[in-house]
Every structure is written in C-alpha cells, then in structure tokens.
Image (cartoon, coloured by chain):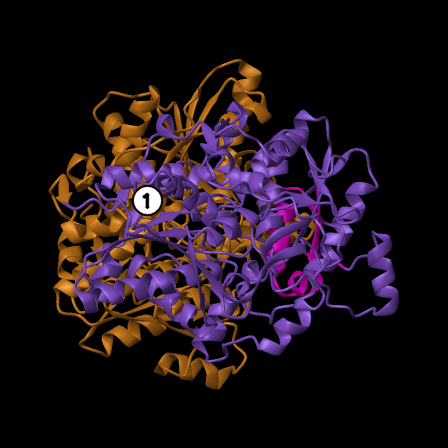
Chain colours: A orange, B purple
Amino acid sequence: MKQVKFMLSEKEMPTSWYNILPDLPKPLPPLLHPGTKEPTILPPPLFPSAMRDQEFSKERYIEIPEEVQDIYKIWRPTPLHRAYRLEKALDTPAKIFYKYEGVSPAGSHKLNTAIAQAYYAKQDGIKRFATETGAGQWGSALSLGTAFFGLECKVYMVKVSYQQKPYRRIMMETWGAKCVASPSEDTAIGRKILAEDPHSPGSLGIAISEAIEDAFGRDDTYYSIGSVINCVLLHQTVIGQEAKKQMEMAGFYPDIIVGCVGGGSNFAGMFLPFVKDKLEGKKPKLRIINVEPEACPSLTQGPYAWDYGDIAGMAPIAKMNTLGHTFIPDKIHAGGLRYHGMAPIICHLHQLGFVEAKAVPQTTTFEAGIQFARTEGIISAPETSHAIRVAIDEALACKKSGESKTILLAHSGHGHFDLAAYDDYLTGKIKDHKVSAAKIKEALAQLPQVEYAGA
Amino acid sequence: MKQVKFMLSEKEMPTSWYNILPDLPKPLPPLLHPGTKEPTILPPPLFPSAMRDQEFSKERYIEIPEEVQDIYKIWRPTPLHRAYRLEKALDTPAKIFYKYEGVSPAGSHKLNTAIAQAYYAKQDGIKRFATETGAGQWGSALSLGTAFFGLECKVYMVKVSYQQKPYRRIMMETWGAKCVASPSEDTAIGRKILAEDPHSPGSLGIAISEAIEDAFGRDDTYYSIGSVINCVLLHQTVIGQEAKKQMEMAGFYPDIIVGCVGGGSNFAGMFLPFVKDKLEGKKPKLRIINVEPEACPSLTQGPYAWDYGDIAGMAPIAKMNTLGHTFIPDKIHAGGLRYHGMAPIICHLHQLGFVEAKAVPQTTTFEAGIQFARTEGIISAPETSHAIRVAIDEALACKKSGESKTILLAHSGHGHFDLAAYDDYLTGKIKDHKVSAAKIKEALAQLPQVEYAGA
C-alpha cells in the first residue's frame, strides 16, 4: 500500500522559528525611516517589542512561546502529501509533493504569524489590534488570532472586497472582530476620502493608512501586518522546518521548490530552511522558484531599489524588487499577490542568486487549479494556483526529458471563499493581465530619492 | 507540553467497515417494496451490486477496497482533538474530545460514502450518477467522488438552495459535475411541475424524484443517496473505528458520545463501533445522544412506524421513527437535518434502548457554534452545531455536579458555506421553530397502510 501523506506528531513540531539573518553571506540592507531616510527599526508604538527584536535578530533559532505552540497544535504539523493522482494524470516521471497549509481554521498559512502577533501584543499589555485586509485572508487570520488571546480586533477591509466577499467579513465577525469597509467614517483619512468621493471603492493603500491612523491614535492598540517584514517571514518558517522532516520521511530531497509570492511570507516560510542547505553549500542544484502573477511582476520586472512599503509613504523604506509604491495592479483574482514590492529577504536572496522567479498569466493558473481539484480533491486559493501552474509545468518538462525530479509545492491555502473566481473561469470570463512597460515606468518614476549608502 | 490532537498513521487506518447487522440482538426489520409492500432489496437498476449485497450483509467486517483506501488517505485518518480551550472557557471538569471530519476536501463526512459509491459504480461498468442535493453537502461530495473515478455526475439541487448557495453549485462544477436547479426542464416530473408553477422553489422530494427518473431512464446511470440506508451508514464506520483507537491513545473511554442526526449516517458512523461494546455488555453506562432540531424531531416526537423514504412514495418503505413522508420541516439553516425519517438502524437501536435522542432549538445551536469557533477556531456547519450545543450542555452539567465525564463529539464538518446563516444569527435574524403537534398529526395521517407482520 502506498503512503499518500507524511505526518509528523505534535512532538516533532518545531519548537523554534529559523532566522536566516545570521546565516546570510552578505547582510540584509536595513529599513530606512520614511522621513529621515536613515536606518530605523519597526515603529515602537505600532509593533510588539518582541517583534521589533526579532526583525533584525542575530539569533539563528528563536523559541516559539509554549502558548503559541499549543495553539499551533490545533492544526499543526500540517500534512505533506504525495500528489500521486496528479502525477498519474500528467503521466510524468516527476514526483510531486505538496505541503498543505489549508488545514488551518482560517484556511491558510496566515494564522502562523497572526497567533504569534496576538501573543506578543498580549504580553505587552495591549488590548486591541488594527489592521487592513484586501481579499480578507489576513483579516480573518488576525481575527482568529486575537480571539484566541481575548484581544479586540478592528479590520479595515477594502470596500470593493467588503462588498464582493461578504463571507470573509462574516468569518471575521464570527470570531468576534469588527470589520468595516474602507474608506470608513472611523478615521480622519477615511472621512477625508469619503468627503471627496462618497463612492470610493477603496484600496489597500487607503486601508493601511486607516489602520495605522487607528493604531497611532490609541495607546491600547497595535498595528498588524501579515507579510513582507522579516519577523513575519520568521514566524512562517514552521512550514519549511516541518516540510524538511517530512521529505526525509518520504525519502526524497527536492530538486525544485515552488511557491507563490505576494508579500512573500508563505513561500519564504517554506524555503528558508532549505536555503540554509544552499548557503552551506550542501545542495547547490536545488532550484527555488518564486511564482508571481504577470499582472504584478515585482521580482521579474521590478528593479532592486529603495521604496516605501505602502502607497502613502508612511511605512519604512526597504531595499526590494518593486514596481513602485504607487503601482496599482489590475484586479486579478489572486488578491493576495497584488503587492507592489516583495519581502526584502526574498529580494536579497534573489540578488545573491539563491532563488529564482517566474511570472505566469492568470488563465493558466485557473486551468492548473481545476486540474489539481479534479485529481487531488483540494480546491486551491487562486494565489496557490500560481504555484500549482509552475509545479505542473516542471512536471511536464520532466515528462519530455524523461527525468524523475522531485518537486515540492508550497500549498498556501484553500479556495472556499474564491469560488466566484472559479465560476468566472468556468464560464469563460477570466482573462490575462500582462502589465505594460509604460505602466511600470510611470510608477517607477515615483521611487523615493535615497542617499543612504551603508548597505 | 499537552497533546491537543491524537493522530493515527495511514497504516492504522481501518481496512474494513464495521457492519452491525450480525451483532444486533434482534434482527433489523426489512425494507418493503413501495408497491407490493413485501420485503425487498435496494432496486438493482439504481444501486451498485456491491451495495445491494452490503445492505443486508451478515459479514461483521467488510473489506474497504484498496483503491478506496488510497483516496481516503488524502484526508484520513481524521484528527481527534481534545477541546482544551473550550473546556477552559466553560470552566468545566469534563473532558471534551471531538473527531473532526471537516478536513475532507468536500468539507464533511459525506465523502466517505461518495468515494465508495463511485468506486462500486465504476466496477459495475456504470458511467454516470444522478443524485439530489438540498443544501449542497451531498452533491459536492458525490461530485468529487465521481471526479476521482472519471464518472459523470448530474446533481438536481433544490432551486431555493441553488439560488441561495451559489458557492456549493460552483464547487460541484469545479469538480466537473453538472448541477441544475430542481424542478428542471431535464425530466418529465420537473417539466410537469414547472408547467403548473414556473416559480416553484423546489423541494428535496421533487429533486429525489427527478434524480430517480434520470437514473431509471438510462442504462449507464445509477442513482445515489447520501444517508439513511444501511450500506451508507456502513461506509461511515471508518469514523468510529478511528475514534476508538484515538480515544485509547488519549487514555480515555467516553461516558457520552454526541452527534447530530438528519438521515443519521455521520453519527451512526461514529457510534456503531462503540455500540458494539454496549451490545457485548462491556460498557453499560455509555450514553449515546442523537441530537436533532426542534423543527424536525423524528426520534423524539415521531412514532416508530412503516413509512416511505421519500415524499413521492417511490422509495422503499422502512420501519423508522418518522414525522410522515409528507412532513415538510420549517426552513432551518441546518438543511442536512431536515429529513422526515431516520436511518432504520438508529431507530432500531433507539427502540432497543441502546441510544437516546434529544431535540434542540435553533438559536441555541448558533450560540454554541459561535462559542466553539471562538475557542477551538473551527467554524462549524449548522448541523454540527446541534451536537456542539448538547456537548456543551453536558459539560456544563458536569460543572454543576463536579463530575469529570469524558464527552466525545462527532464533528461532521465545517461551515465555510454557511456563513450567511452565521450572519443572520449575529444580526438577530435567527428564530426558533418548534413544530406544532397539529402539524405532525396531519403528516402522520398520510402514513402508508402496511400489513406485513414478519418483523
């Protein structure tokens, strides 16, 4: 009988997060203050002290608090699957494995950091979080994270998503969070925008600004972000540490690891423990492929440059591959991949040649998602389907070449709240959104002028 | 560190289903033909031969085909959780465990039988299934089951649900099934009803009639049912067999097992392997509580009588607790619990005193569902929340009495597609639906006259 899943016991769950910073061959450039443009830390009134320490920590392993581990155990360790049925449908000699984060109650990897953030905020005596959400994945994860620790949570949800995805909003409310459509009447910036345009559909940039204003204005409130920054990637390294042990159980080491990247936290969480092997010279041939949408190709088409983390220029400036902080991608269904920049750690590793990147058109990702659903059963988030596309392409390349490569797919979450997108695909309403060079050029003209030459 | 989940390896997954029929102290009454009213079998042109054999088999253990086991492994064995966080919130000395079937790709236990049915149909050389679905759980499970075996699937979905729950319909289509609103133009009975009332909202009874007509009319097509009959309960016994081993791992034997019942297949799948211990006299004090909605109280208020399985009187007549086959329950959100009868095996065990039953009002089930979501993280199906209500009530009774009972909850599935119902609850729109004695009396007047005295 074949083994389909490789499961770890709770005792085998990692007890530390892996911090790659001390292992990097060249140091990661710092964050710069958006005003002074000098090196800075995560702003103290907005972030838990533990996370500020973690952001540039020199410790290789950072212990996961026991209370956080106990909550992780509700769904972790997550399964590693061998995709026998997909392999058979593709008639490929490749071996495809996927690590499935969709078993979390919030439906994706996002809960790994949401719980840590809520725990640390509680430690600091904070009572409340404010955050933004686009499609709703992050807002739901933080709503549950805060519910576990008895904290309040206020989510500013981009109005167009708030209207299109009521189930995500209800999910947050079921866990006890308050969710408002952004722009809202609850902040000065929201009121200003509504005064100018009462029918504003909102944007992630506006929602971030509302959440930050909310958190700045109250002593009992932190601001929370679900990706991009170092400590959020750190919290996600439970994924890759588990996957490494599980691949050992299966008796294979991957030739290729593939995952989708928006801010980059899910895929970095998977690959950082494997990159360690490359940094140590152990696995020079391992390929790590970051998959992004053709509509928002920061790694494949954006320069490695200093840029603001947010549209309003309130967040720190980071060195990253960016399409420009004013770049607004087309409204593809993979809302979680519509970020103008990319996690600085990923960009740094990309610069150093340890990871690669690929952009894929939207229609082909739905085709891959459907094939995955009909063979492996799981209906995937449109974000995840970007990674599935490339995993399938690599498996088909093996079919041509006759090679029996081992492919490890980072499966970030299910698509139960994205079925309207599947309906659009099945009824022929999905199109591709290749971005024009002119659009990128226009946004890149808005990059900040930075004199800093320290890194 | 405490252990939160008790997981079995794939090797520990049951390789047989447990058939209780040979262990019953008194034989189960037969099915009667709806025309002749004489003992009958499942109609051959509609059901796989293997299932016809299983329906009244004398074998205690029936081997699960290897191909079915391989597909089960995508999500099985399912986890057994200790609900530490709920226990703490209730401040109870009771120990609450739950066996979680929501990790299946279709979101509930229904997939356990859907895969077996599709496998057996394929063995018989059948190419296609026709079935009905109310809220959509069963239709989605069979859509995925048939996708795994390359069969076609046509689902007649009650029109009002088809319109209210588009995500369920899209889920089926994503897996490749065809789903139409019932009454449809695709059958004679559908066309007849539409001719009389073009705006008919449909009913489960109409949808069953359409599916049966479809299957009767084509040699390549079987009809499929997702609960009630013996062999479907049989397929669900993987749940209870796993749970028994997992409770042993946890070091406890349940004092109380609780689950929700509509047709009864999920909860019977859980409790039948435990009832075996009671039949053998080993666990006389074990309580098994079937929870049903106050709006459809077949076990608590229906007589144990001969009645048709369907509204149209086309299905076999079974001896069961029934509210009458013409009984139409109010439109509570737990659509899966709106069946006029109950699995004959459950009713028989109820008659013999091995299991008990309790009916609960709708509002209290949502209250329980919310408490479960905010402590254990999982958003439950409204059906499951009926069982959660009683599990919590029993735990609170322990708090009063100071007893530290062990409660095992059969958690049948997640509520990702039921969030509109949660929204109604959170905004005060949910009410109770206690059924009137007059309504039951009226439906019971339509029970068939049966002379059969064999059992």
> x and y percent of residue A5 in the render?
39, 30
| Quarter of the figure with the C terminus of chain A | top left
| Quarter of the figure with the N terminus of chain A | top left
Q: Quadrant of residue A220?
A: bottom left
Q: Secondary structure at mark 1?
A: strand
Q: Is residue B353 above or below residue B9?
A: below
Which span of residues is magenta-colored? B153-182
- Residue in view at x 48 percent, y 62 percent: B292
> x and y percent of residue B91 in the render?
19, 65
Residue lying furthest top: A402
Judging by the rendered image, the residue that carries numbered circle 1 is B80
Question: Is A349 in the magenta?
Answer: no
Amino acid at circle 1: Leu
- Residue in view at x 31 percent, y 29 percent: A246
Q: Is residue B200 above or below residue B406?
A: below
Q: Of residues A323 and B360, which is closer to you in this image?
A: B360
- Residue in view at x 34 percent, y 70 percent: A176
